[in-house]
Image (spheres, helix red, strand yellow):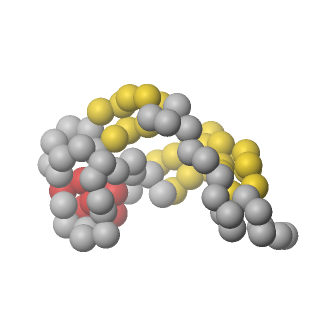
Amino acid sequence: MRAVVIEQYGVVPEVREVPEPEVADGSVVLKVEATGLCRSDWHGWMGHDSDIVLPHVPGHELAGTIAAIGAGVEG
């Protein structure tokens, strides 16, 4: 699948192919139809967020549909 990938803080990210995610127990995989980037993504890109581990695919504000459901997911 195509994704924006941050390889280095402060360096322009690349759009490239990355592996499809696999569903894990207790989780779901979403087919993302649209996503946006916000100020917190900018802080992650600049290296201000210690929780960001590189390489990183930004974009936590998204809309889509459930594509796969892991074992143990209910509701």
- Does residue 31 lie above or below 60 as drawn? above
Image location (x, y in percent) of residue 1: 52, 31
Is residue 18 in view from this perspective? yes
Q: Is residue 24 left or right of residue 35?
A: right
Q: In this view, does 48 lie to the left or right of 73?
A: left
Q: In this view, does 56 lie to the left or right of 62?
A: left
Q: Nearer the viewer, residue 71 or 8?
A: 71
- Identified at 65% across, 43% down, the residue is 31
**Picture quadrant where residue 16 is located:** top left
Q: Which of 15 and 40 is in front in this view?
A: 15
Image location (x, y in percent) of residue 43: 25, 61
Is residue 42 in view from this perspective? no
- Does residue 34 lie above or below 29 as drawn? above
- Identified at 84% across, 70% down, the residue is 75
- Identified at 39% across, 48% down, the residue is 57
Image location (x, y in percent) of residue 22: 61, 47
- Does residue 29 lie above or below 49 as drawn? above
- Identified at 18% across, 61% down, the residue is 47
